[in-house]
Image (cartoon, rainbow, N blue to C red):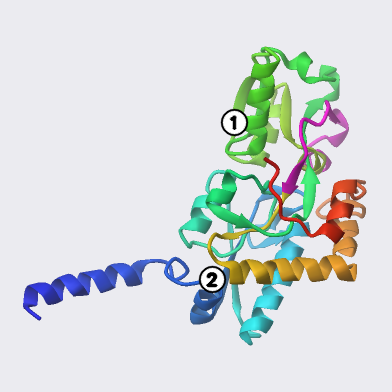
C-alpha cells in the first residue's frame, strides 16, 4: 500500500471509530462493548419523567426505564452496567436517538406512523389526548373561546400539529406560541403571555399540580384525539425492541405495571405530595391484555 493510500485508509478508520458505537452496531452489542447504557429523561413531564434536581429524575416512565435497564443487565450478564441519563426535549429526542447519542427513551412521546419512519415504538404504556389548561379567572371553557387568542404549547409536540389543524378546520385563527419544553410553555400561561396551554391532558394535570398556584388553574375543553405513548428505540433493531417489549409485557401481566400506575397517578408524588387522581383509562386497561404498539395516526 502506498503512503497516500495508507493515509486515506487511516482517515476512514478514524472517521468510523469516531461515530457513536450504537450507530454502527445493534444496541445490545453496543451497550455490551461500552459497558454502558445511555437513557433519556424529560425535565418537566410530570408524572412520567421530571427532574427533582440536576442529578435526579423521577416518574412513571423513569421506573419503566429502570426495569428495562435491569433486564438489559440480566441479558448481558453485566450486573454493574453503567447507566448514563441525559435530558431531551420534544425537538431533539428523535434526532439524538437516531444518531446514537442515547439508547432508549421512555417518556411522554406519542407513537405516530410518521415518527415510526425514524424510530421504533414499544408496547404502548399510556393513552391521552390534547386538552387545555387555563386560569380559572379567564373563564375559558372551550377552544372557541380562544379564537384569535394566544395559546401556548410545546415545540415539536403532536399537540402543536393537532391544535393548528383544529384551529384551521374551525376558522378560529388561534395564535400559537411555542415553548421549548413543557415548563417554558406553562410559564407563558402563568405570565399571561398565553391565554391557555394545550398539551396532553395528563401533562396538564401534572403541570397544574406543581404550578406556582394550582388552585388558579383548571383543565378544560374536550379531548381532541386519543394518542398512545410508547418507549422509543432505534429502527431496524428487532432484538432490542423485543427486549423492551418483553419487559413491558412482563410488568403488565404480573400486576407490577398497575402498581406503578397507582404510585404515580393515584398517590402523592414528589416534590409536593400532590395527587393527580387519574384512574387508568379504558384504553390502557385494554392494552394490558392486547400489548399493542399500534400508532395513533
Q: Is residue 181 left or right of residue 26?
A: right
Q: Quadrant of residue 267?
A: bottom right
Determine the CA span between mark 2 and mark 1: 34 Å
Q: Is residue 147 above or below residue 237?
A: above
As displayed, is residue 20 above or below residue 3? above
Name which of mark 2 and mark 1 comes first in the sequence. 2
Q: Quadrant of the N terminus?
A: bottom left
Judge by depth and name the residue closer to the eye, 59 or 189.
59
Residue identifier under label 2:
27
- Residue at the image position 32 percent from the left and 69 percent from the top: 16
Give the image quarter of residue 40: bottom right
Q: What's the residue at 67%, 18% (across, down)? A: 169
Q: Position of residue 37 (x, y in %)?
A: 57, 72
Residue at (8, 72) in percent of width and height: 4
Tell me if residue 54 comes above or below residue 153 in the rendering.
Answer: below
- For residue 220: magenta? yes
Residue 107 placement, left or right of 206: left
- Report the quarter where the C terminus lies: top right
x then y, percent, for residue 6: 14, 77
Q: What segment is highlighted magenta in the picture?
A: 207-228
SS for dot 1: strand
Cβ atoms under marks 2 and 1 closer than 8 Å: no
User: Which residue is labeled 1 in the image?
Assistant: 178
| Residue 192 numbered tag | none
Amino acid at each position: 500500500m502506498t503512503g497516500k493510500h495508507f493515509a486515506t485508509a487511516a482517515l476512514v478508520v478514524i472517521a468510523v471509530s469516531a461515530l457513536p458505537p450504537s450507530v454502527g452496531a445493534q444496541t445490545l452489542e453496543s451497550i455490551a462493548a461500552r459497558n454502558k447504557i445511555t437513557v433519556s429523561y424529560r425535565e418537566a413531564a410530570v408524572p412520567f419523567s421530571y427532574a427533582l434536581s440536576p442529578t435526579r429524575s423521577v416518574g412513571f416512565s423513569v421506573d419503566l426505564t429502570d426495569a428495562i435497564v435491569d433486564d438489559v443487565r440480566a441479558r448481558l450478564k453485566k450486573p454493574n452496567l453503567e447507566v448514563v441519563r441525559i435530558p431531551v426535549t420534544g425537538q431533539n429526542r428523535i434526532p439524538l436517538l437516531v444518531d446514537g447519542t442515547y439508547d432508549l427513551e421512555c417518556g411522554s412521546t406519542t407513537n405516530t406512523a410518521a415518527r415510526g419512519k425514524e424510530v421504533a415504538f414499544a408496547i404502548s404504556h399510556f393513552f391521552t389526548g390534547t386538552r387545555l389548561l387555563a386560569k380559572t379567572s379567564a373563564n375559558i371553557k372551550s377552544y372557541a373561546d380562544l379564537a384569535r387568542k394566544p395559546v401556548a404549547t410545546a415545540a415539536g409536540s403532536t399537540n402543536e400539529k393537532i391544535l393548528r389543524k383544529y384551529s384551521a378546520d374551525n376558522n378560529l385563527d388561534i395564535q400559537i406560541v411555542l415553548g421549548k419544553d413543557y415548563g417554558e410553555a406553562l410559564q407563558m400561561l402563568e405570565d399571561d403571555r398565553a391565554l391557555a396551554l394545550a398539551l396532553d391532558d395528563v401533562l396538564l394535570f401534572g403541570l397544574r399540580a406543581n404550578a406556582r398556584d394550582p388552585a388558579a388553574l383548571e383543565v378544560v375543553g374536550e379531548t381532541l384525539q386519543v394518542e398512545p405513548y410508547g418507549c422509543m428505540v432505534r429502527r431496524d433493531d428487532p432484538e432490542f425492541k423485543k427486549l423492551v417489549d418483553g419487559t413491558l409485557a412482563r410488568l403488565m401481566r404480573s400486576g407490577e405495571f398497575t402498581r406503578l400506575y397507582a404510585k404515580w397517578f393515584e398517590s402523592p408524588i414528589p416534590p409536593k405530595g400532590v395527587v393527580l387522581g387519574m384512574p387508568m383509562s379504558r384504553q390502557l386497561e385494554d392494552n394490558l391484555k392486547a400489548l399493542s404498539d399500534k400508532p395513533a395516526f
